[in-house]
Image (cartoon, grey):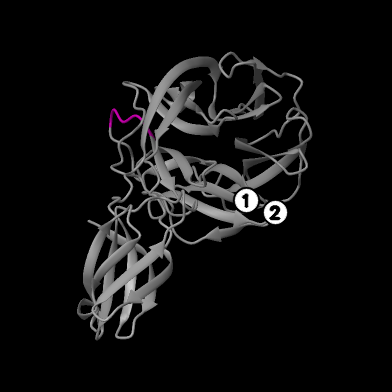
Amino acid sequence: MRRILAFMAAATAASVVVVSAVSAVQAASESTFDFAFVSSSPVQSVSPDVVVANGTYYLFTTGMGGIGVYTSSNGEAWTQVTTARTPTGQVSDPSVVQLADGSYRMYYTARSGMGNQPCSGKQLRYATSPDLTTWTVQSAVLLADLGCGVPDVVRDGNSFNLYYVRGNPVEHGTYMATSPDGLTWTTVDGIRTPRDFVDPSVVKVRDGHWLMMVADFPAGPPTPGFFQKLYVGTSTDGRTWDWGDRTPVYAPPGLGAFDPNLNLMADGTFKVWFAQGASAEVATVAYGVLTEDAPEPTPVLVPPTKPTVALTKSRATISWQFPVGATTPSAFVIERKSGNAWVTVGEVAADKRTFATTVRALGG
């Protein structure tokens, strides 16, 4: 269906004439995604988070008694940094961002008390580092109730977005908070995902749209034989998400895939590190590549300019200009005002810049 996208008007002695640029472009289709599994490492952990600095990959993991640090030259073969100083104790789910001054901030989940539920007593806390291996734990509690945790923090210019999971049956799913500095957080009302989507990892793509990779997990007890799978959603603002037909991008048979860490690399590719295994207790860090097949953007038409109407006793010639190099419309449509309605007078091809008709046709 054609849509009138831009117009200009000129007044004749008898009526107002409108010239519109018309497009036959259809609405853009949804992005599609392909995921290619690459390898599985011997690093046994959940909630991996990877940062690349000066050609070195840094992997942060949830380990026994603290956050683990590993390095790699290719993102697949990892060596533990045994001298690293990181948060210890009942801590998990690291999410590392680089700040404007080049230093790093690690957000993580800390337990303030076990409570009687798996998702109770979790707080958002942070540590700072100049080099990704020596971390100084800060005393501030950024959010006192982080639900189930699994925080993912995204720096967007000078502001920050936090995505995290709530796990009780009523609120189950992924939620959001925002901050002007990454330290003072305001929660955003409403759930961001379907209720069975958890473990969020979010990136903002260079053209301005957003991707979120998640794993599925039911609000109630999982059925026998259930294994988590990976999904990808898209957004134009980082708040409202489209999940298409909810087809998983990765569902390994007999294994669960969860806690994804989606990274936009310097070359524009998407690399994903995630936990994979028959259960969380035996999961190891795996690696894959995500490819987005994004639709072509809808061309933006600009309006015709400088309308003129030349009149003789019986003829009217309407002319206009159109910018050189602008997206070409499929046609130009000429209309006149008749009472409160617009009446089509004629249509000309996109390469035309004039239209001749009778004065009577223009209402004269």
Q: Decide which of tag 2 and tag 1 comes sooner along the chain.
A: 1
Can residue 112 be seen at all in this image of the molecule?
Answer: no
Residue situated furthest front in the rendering: 313
Q: Residues within 10 Å of mark 2 (few under 14, many from 20)?
A: few
The percent position of residue 158, horizontal first and vertical second, equals: 68, 52
Q: In screen coordinates, is 68 left or right of 341? A: right
**Residue 35 located within the stretch drawn in magenta:** no
Position in image of residue 119 (x %, y %): 50, 45
Q: Is residue 347 left or right of residue 184?
A: left
The quadrant of the rendering that contains the C terminus is bottom left
Which element type, helix, strand or loop, lies under badge 2? loop
Magenta segment boundaries in residue numbering: 224-230
Q: Nearer the viewer, residue 43 or 342?
A: 342
Front-lying residue, 84 or 250: 250
Q: Main secondary structure of the magenta part?
A: loop
Q: Amino acid at mark 2?
A: Asp
Numbered badge on residue 160: 1
User: Who's the residue at 48% across and 32% down the image?
Assistant: 260
Q: Residues within 10 Å of mark 1 (few under 14, many from 20)?
A: some
**Which residue in the structure is indicated by mark 2?**
181
In the foreground, 74 or 198: 74
For the point 59% across and 44% down, which residue is it?
A: 153
**Residue at image location 75% in from the left, 24% down from the top:** 84
Q: Position of residue 306 (x, y in %)?
A: 45, 68
Q: Are marks 2 and 1 in contact (CB under 8 Å)?
A: yes
Residue in the image at 31% along x and 41% along y: 246
Q: Is residue 162 above or below residue 32?
A: below
Image quarter for residue 4?
Answer: bottom left
- Label 1's element? strand
